[in-house]
Amino acid sequence: MTNLMLSTIGVLLAAAAVLMVTFYGGEAFFVGSQKAEASRLTVEGAQIEQAISNFTVRYGRAPGNGGTHDEAMSELMSKKFLASAPRGAGEPWVIDYGNGLIRSDIGASDDEEAREICAEARGQQNLPNPDRVYRCDGSDHPSGSLPANEPCCLF
């Protein structure tokens, strides 16, 4: 009889532990993965930005002569400024000369998870109002254009 009661209590404790891990651990995993994704995107963007800067200093012009993304990325890799193209978020990185930015589209502007990743990236860089994600054209930024260290924007 004692074995039966101890077994029952053990099963109940194990079930309670599984529920706690699922409830609290799931949220911690989600927040942790958002932080990791924001960090990864910030580092990848900085790598591309630095590669473009180094290329420009060495050759006196923009990679790909300011043409298309494919031309720019190909030249950065062929001249060994990048070992490979960073993978980006939902979409690969794009050197967008037309809008004057480097971007990887995380999600739609109404995608809450994408906004949270952007806010986390802004927070990691200690930017003012980290929860405020600006439009890529900079029309809603206080200065009227996005600064170079802006890690995330919305189209």
Image (cartoon, rainbow, N blue to C red):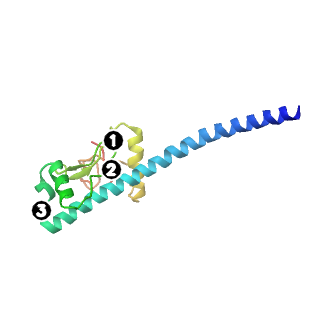
> Cα distance, mark 2 to mark 3?
25 Å
Residue contact at pointers 1 and 2, CB within 8 angstroms: no
| Residue displayed at 54% across by 46% down | 28
Q: Amino acid at mark 2?
A: Cys
The secondary element bearing badge 2 is classed as loop
The secondary element bearing badge 1 is classed as loop
Q: Amino acid at mark 3?
A: Arg
Q: How busy is the neighbourhood of tag 2: few (under 14 within 10 Å), some, or many (20 plus)?
A: many
Q: Is residue 60 above or below residue 73?
A: below
Q: Is residue 131 visible?
A: no
The secondary element bearing badge 3 is classed as loop
**Residue 41: percent from the left, percent from the top?**
35, 52
Which badge, 3 or 1, is on the more N-terminal residue? 3
Quarter assignment of residue 92: top left
- Decide if residue 96 is on the left or right side of residue 108: left
Q: How busy is the neighbourhood of tag 3: few (under 14 within 10 Å), some, or many (20 plus)?
A: few
**Residue 96: percent from the left, percent from the top?**
20, 49
Q: Which residue is mark 1?
A: 90
Q: Which residue is mark 3?
A: 61
**Residue 138: percent from the left, percent from the top?**
25, 50
